[in-house]
């Protein structure tokens, strides 16, 4: 099984020592099959508002995944499909403007690209439940899924 962490998991780890310990414990067991979404990279970089924070995110998150060649990006088809997913969700829920739900653009892109790569997304974001009915084959899990092998 392959995993990717959603932006909210990284942010919790940056802000809270207990959450950080859980992220590191997960990495200790699952790093060989954990990947980083380029969309999550964008969100993390956008949130790094100081030079030091940007450097910490680059060195502590991006570079380790880049060195291991474990960063994945949405394909052209994923962009088109994620747009169709957003349109379908908007029609079902009755919202007219994307301005009402701007974070769903990236969430749909993450969902579709994870599905393309056969990656399970670890997230606390409830929007992925809403999206999953439109993205067949997409899997997500709440922190922290059981992993094979010794605890």
Image: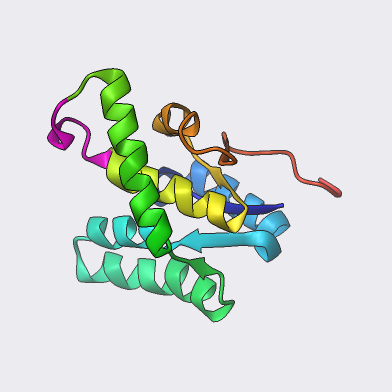
Residue 140 x %, y %:
56, 38
Q: In the drawing, does residue 60 fall left or right of residue 50?
A: right
Q: Nearer the viewer, residue 140 or 137?
A: 137
What colour scheme does the image use? rainbow
Q: In the drawing, does residue 35 fall left or right of residue 46?
A: right
Q: Residue at x 20, y 65 (%)?
A: 50
Q: Residue at x 37, y 38 (%)?
A: 85
Q: Give yes or no for residue 101 being in the magenta stretch.
A: yes
Which picture quadrant has residue 138?
top right
Residue with the most extreme bottom position: 67
Q: Is residue 27 above or below residue 13?
A: below
Which picture quadrant has residue 62?
bottom left
Q: Residue at x 38, y 63 (%)?
A: 76
Q: Residue at x 69, y 56 (%)?
A: 30
Q: Is residue 39 above or below residue 105?
A: below
Residue 6 x %, y %:
45, 47
Q: Is residue 123 above or below residue 92?
A: below
Bounds of the magenta segment = 96-103
Q: Give yes or no for residue 33 being in the magenta stretch.
A: no
Residue with the most extreme right position: 150
Residue 16 x %, y %:
43, 43
Please state the total of marks drawn on the protein image.
Answer: 0
Q: Is residue 58 visible?
A: yes
Q: Nearer the viewer, residue 40 or 93?
A: 93
Residue 87 x %, y %:
28, 35
């Amino acid at each position: 099984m392959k995993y990717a962490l959603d932006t909210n998991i990284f942010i919790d780890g940056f802000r809270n020592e207990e959450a950080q310990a859980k992220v590191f414990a997960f990495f200790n067991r699952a790093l060989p099959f954990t990947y980083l979404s380029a969309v999550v990279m964008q969100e993390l970089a956008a949130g790094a508002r100081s030079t030091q924070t940007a450097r910490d995110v680059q060195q502590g998150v991006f570079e380790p995944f880049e060195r291991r060649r474990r960063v994945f990006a949405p394909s052209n088809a994923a962009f088109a499909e994620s747009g169709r997913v957003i349109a379908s969700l908007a029609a079902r829920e009755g919202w007219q403007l994307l301005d009402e739900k701007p974070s769903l653009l990236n969430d749909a892109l993450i969902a579709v690209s994870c599905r393309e790569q056969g990656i399970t997304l670890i997230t606390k974001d409830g929007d992925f439940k809403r999206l999953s009915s439109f993205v067949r084959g997409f899997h997500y899990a709440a922190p922290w899924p059981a992993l094979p092998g010794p605890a």
